Image (cartoon, grey):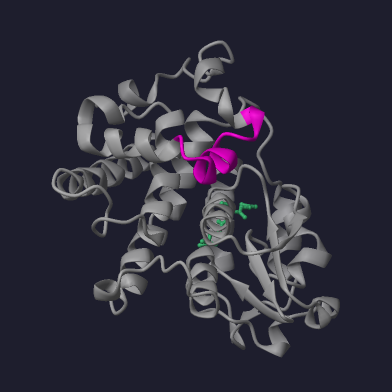
Amino acid sequence: MVQLLDQDIMTREVLDWKGVHLFHAAISSCSQKARVYLNFKGINWTSHVVEMGANNESYYMGINPRGLVPTLVHDGDVHIESNDIILHLEEHFPSPPMIPVAYRGSIKQLLRHEDDLHLQLRTVTFRFLMPPTNKPPKSQEELDAYASSGSGTVLGIADEAKAREIAFYRWFLEGGIPEKAVQAAVAQFKAEFMGLNETLRSQPFLLGDAVSVLDIAWLIYAHRLFICGYPIERLHPSLWEWYQRLSIDARFKDEIAAPHEMASMRERLPAEGRYDRGTLEDVCAL
Ligand SMILES: N[C@@H](CCC(=O)N[C@@H](CS)C(=O)NCC(=O)O)C(=O)O
């Protein structure tokens, strides 16, 4: 669990907050995951929307030293990392349970495996979904400011996650995301999706007969890949059936479809020129 220590937090006002507060952004996949989970649990929470850009300003960097969303403030304790946020809430709000008893020992590892692909998800997103622009998403000056803002520590230790973030955004200052990185990311998702598809051939949900936190986590990824142009239906029919079944459930639908800019994106991509350098299927030879 990543519950920050006092010394990690510079925006001190949150330490006095009572109840469940979530800092999140509409189109952020990790925020979607946390919101879907909150919907399933029926937990009352206070929303703090973080506009992209404001996540690197000093107020938010003082709450989350990585400058990433989501962040949970629960009765004055600050938790980062979407999967850890979910696991923390599951401990405090056990009903209805969203981790089958048989998986209580392994769920952390299963979720970590999903989170390990987060930068790959962002790679595919920036390549196929973001509006075309010649301006890098973050300038060198912005990256320098990011490097030195916030406490710089997580759990009291100098945080290495920032370096990964900076390396990702430096790609855009050096000519864009390398095509090889896009292809490698999609290949990793394909391998994962093949495994999930196999599981879903014999059971309705990833951990058995009931929806679990693992379904939430992977559905968000499957949705993002789908709107980027990944052919789930053609390559992974059981995964597609699961995705179709779950994504019409209001607890998912309201979070993954609500932001209009995302909802209609798959349809708008060709007209916006996103496919001028090839569709995901072309680029990744799927
Ligand atoms: N492993 C982290 C990843 C968090 C993350 O990368 N969040 C993205 C949105 S999904 C973000 O805040 N991006 C802002 C940025 O790149 O500046 C988690 O699960 O919470």
> Foreground residue, 194 or 36?
36
Could you tell me residue 163's position as x and y percent? 55, 65
In the image, residue 222 sits, relative to residue 211, either above or below, namely above
Could you tell me residue 132's position as x and y percent? 61, 25
> Foreground residue, 37 or 8?
37
**Residue 112 location, quadrant:** bottom left
> Can you say which quadrant of the picture contains the C terminus?
top left
Please indicate whether residue 31 sits to the left or right of residue 6 in the image: left
Could you tell me residue 7's position as x and y percent? 72, 88
Could you tell me residue 74's position as x and y percent? 68, 76
**Can residue 97 be seen by looking at this rendering?**
yes
Magenta residue span: 248-261
Q: What residue is shown at x 51% (from left), y 16% (from top)?
A: 267
Q: What residue is shown at x 72% (from left), y 78% (from top)?
A: 151
In the image, residue 152 sits, relative to residue 122, either above or below, namely below
Instruction: Determine the main secondary structure of the stretch shown in magenta.
Output: helix
Q: What residue is shown at x 37% (from left), y 50% (from top)?
A: 218
**Can residue 176 be seen by looking at this rendering?**
no
Taking the image in four quarters, ligand 1 sits in the one at: bottom right
> Foreground residue, 245 or 262?
245
Q: Residue 258: within the magenta?
A: yes
